[in-house]
Image (tube, coloured by chain):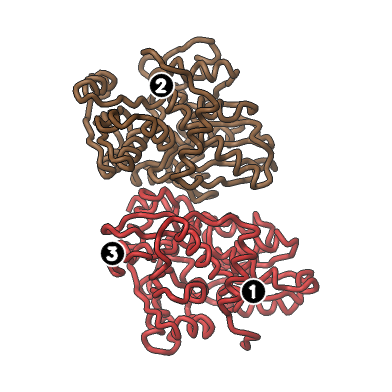
Chain colours: A red, B brown
Amino acid sequence: MTFLRQPTRAGVRDAAAKIAAILPATPLFTCEIKDVTIAFKAESLQPMGAFKIRGAWHRLTALDEAARARGVVAFSSGNHAQGVAWAARRLGMAATIVMPHDAPAVKRDATLALGAEVVGYDRATESREGIAARLAEARGATLVPSFDDPWIIEGQGSAGVEAAAQMTRAGLPEPTHVVAPCGGGGLAAGLALALPDARMTVVEPEGWDDMRRSLEAGWIEPVGPNPPPTACDSLQTLRVSPLTFDVLSRRGVTGVAVSEAETAAAQRWAAERFRLVIEPGGAVALAALLTGRITPEPGMLVLLSGGNIDPAAYARMLAA
Amino acid sequence: MTFLRQPTRAGVRDAAAKIAAILPATPLFTCEIKDVTIAFKAESLQPMGAFKIRGAWHRLTALDEAARARGVVAFSSGNHAQGVAWAARRLGMAATIVMPHDAPAVKRDATLALGAEVVGYDRATESREGIAARLAEARGATLVPSFDDPWIIEGQGSAGVEAAAQMTRAGLPEPTHVVAPCGGGGLAAGLALALPDARMTVVEPEGWDDMRRSLEAGWIEPVGPNPPPTACDSLQTLRVSPLTFDVLSRRGVTGVAVSEAETAAAQRWAAERFRLVIEPGGAVALAALLTGRITPEPGMLVLLSGGNIDPAAYARMLAA
């Protein structure tokens, strides 16, 4: 795949302005952890329940009129699908989403409710990339990747611009250390561009910590064969992209991994302390902090990146 | 009990200004219900998880220096306790809370964490009013009622001032119909004063709908003997106050009752649609809307009044 351009800090600022024009800032919560005030950005409270709405909006609004008329195609287990569907509906565009048959029903239903067409595939035997590429070609539509795209990265980074402004207004220091969940790395790369002076840590589920291993190795290492089951459906990315890896690698970002039990405990903590429903993949950065894998420090910003989860699955998680 | 004054609309405006100076506005969410855009005010996202922080702040800041030095006493099953404890800590005052032994652990622990002293009592055999009054007299402290007080009512009403401004900014009509959960009626009376041009409906759990019956009768009727069990611990008020009843009665407010199952369904809906943890008592107004007991109309404002619930109890509710 060739890229027309690299994502830039100017692009993130542009995305932040475009997004501020249509969406209120998601709330920033603060909480004392070991006597340090930590800021939490609740992207779970976006209209479709995750930060993905940011990248989708920045990408779709960058298309010219002819491209808009031909619509967009995306592949996603859920949150990116909803982000693209939301942005497409708002712009009056057609959206087709390629989604695994085993995606959470709440995510598929929400995507359909946003007016998108959903095309299913089998995660084990079919290639979603192949299906999406064929659909896009047949329809002349634009393929919207979930992280491997400069607009998507810049759009996700707008969360960092917004959070930094909110921290200043709340009398907190500038962000010194950003902790974010990582699937393909779109959010993390965007935040790294948005906040060039902050340290950064990415968090992944155990066995799916390919970004952590890649950053340690200095080259891209995919998820190993037979990765363990994880409740973090939104972070099940088998390989990160050169685009996201390069941004994080040049920045000296490091990663940590958290267990399924630690993620569930973080979800319970968020329900009790913040009264927020956070999906497993959205709670891993919080889990890294609560388990002490990351040490609280003034100016720390933690992303609660999404809240889309079936109520029944969520109830099981809380009760465990 | 004698009252020094009646709660007023000017008092609500004063409270709203005082609260805006220390707390960011709680988010206003919108959602289409039967093709009508409804506004939802998420008071569950207050720092201590409920609107009660508003009345407590307005009341405690109205005390003079001598009274502040002697501290405050309150009786509450939880949310009012946390509101008073939060405001007292912020003002450097001592707070003593009289709380039933069977109050949710999450609420008692949170009150203790806010630095208040908690005095337990037996709901069946002891009078919390008596215990609180004796404590207040012995210490020279100010008793802070949970609803039967003009400052408390005015403070709670600030949620209406805030919501109306947010609705205008979101391009919605002025509030035309406000739907609010009702225990003792402090929130409802405050909203009625804040929004004099809106219709109003109060919502209570079945068997605890004494405000509904009182408004229908034209005089105060207490909850009947042996009321059914309810998960709505924050709405278990046995008798409303003349102060709240008069405001609502003069306004022609009516009430509806919802079942336990309907409340649980509303909690699940809020988790899935808004990614918000709402406690049973905080979800009854939403339940009235979702069940069709209240017909959606443009300009409707629904209060999601609190989110303090034990994760285990919440899990059982979601799974039911």
The picture places residue A242, in percent across and down from the top left corner, at: 52, 85
Nearest to N terminus: mark 1 or mark 3: 1
Front-most of residues B125 and A42 = A42
The picture places residue A220, in percent across and down from the top left corner, at: 45, 87
Q: Nearer the viewer, mark 1 or mark 3?
A: 3
Front-most of residues B249 and B291 = B249
Left or right: A304, with A289 as reference point: right
Q: Secondary structure at mark 3?
A: loop
Q: Quadrant of residue A290?
A: bottom left
Q: Which mark is residue B148?
A: 2
Q: Name above or below for residue B136 compared with residue A125.
A: above
Left or right: B109, with A286 as reference point: left
Could you classify mark 3 by the number of other residues whose Cα lies within 10 Å: few (under 14), some (14-19), or many (20 or more)? Answer: some
The quarter of the image holding the N terminus of chain B is top left
Mark 3 = which residue? A291
Residue ID at (42%, 39%): B50
Mark 1 = which residue? A144
Q: Which mark is residue A306?
A: none
Q: Nearer the viewer, mark 1 or mark 2?
A: 2
Give the number of callouts.
3
User: Which chain is indicated by disc 2?
Assistant: B
* Amino acid on which disc 2 is placed: Asp
User: Which chain is indicated by disc 3?
Assistant: A
Q: CA distance from mark 1 to mark 3?
A: 36 Å
* Amino acid on which disc 1 is placed: Val
